[in-house]
Amino acid sequence: NGSADGPFVYTGFRPRWIMFKRSDDTSSWRIHDTEREDFNPHDSLLFPNENSAETTNSAYKVDIVSSGFKVRNTNSNFNTSSGTYLYAAFAEHPFKTARAR
């Protein structure tokens, strides 16, 4: 939405890690996880398709909560009103509350 109070993405679980990419741009993939940073906001991330080290930058803030994640930045690679984004989120405890029958 382009706002500093960005969108909330409901996943139904607390993500262990999240990978983002803006699909209508040439931006890099970005990964936030709860292993390296276990408090909100998460502003440390990895760029898996680059030869760069871990980056910490307040322009990349994301809150990881019990039912999904909330973008807390206006960086165009995460949150812009005209962007299209892809994400993959993997659960911290994938089988603890599974409801499959």
Image (cartoon, helix red, strand yellow):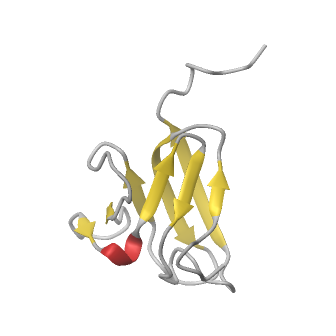
Q: Is residue 13 above or below residue 3?
A: above
Q: Nearer the viewer, residue 41 or 100?
A: 41
Determine the residue located farthest toward the left in the rendered image.
53
Q: Residue at x 46, y 57 (%)?
A: 63
Q: Nearer the viewer, residue 29 or 16?
A: 16
Determine the residue located farthest toward the front in the rendered image.
5
Q: Is residue 43 left or right of residue 11?
A: left
Q: Is residue 7 above or below residue 65?
A: below
Q: Residue at x 52, y 78 (%)?
A: 4
Quadrant in which the N terminus is drawn = bottom right
Residue 41 coordinates in the image, percent (x, y) = 38, 60
Quadrant in which the C terminus is drawn = top right
Q: Is residue 60 left or right of residue 101?
A: left
Which picture quadrant has residue 61?
A: bottom left
Label total for image: 0
Residue 77 coordinates in the image, percent (x, y) = 50, 78
Q: Residue at x 45, y 62 (%)?
A: 62
Q: Residue at x 33, y 49 (%)?
A: 39
Residue 99 coordinates in the image, percent (x, y) = 72, 20
Q: Nearer the viewer, residue 6 or 50?
A: 6
Residue 42 coordinates in the image, percent (x, y) = 36, 59
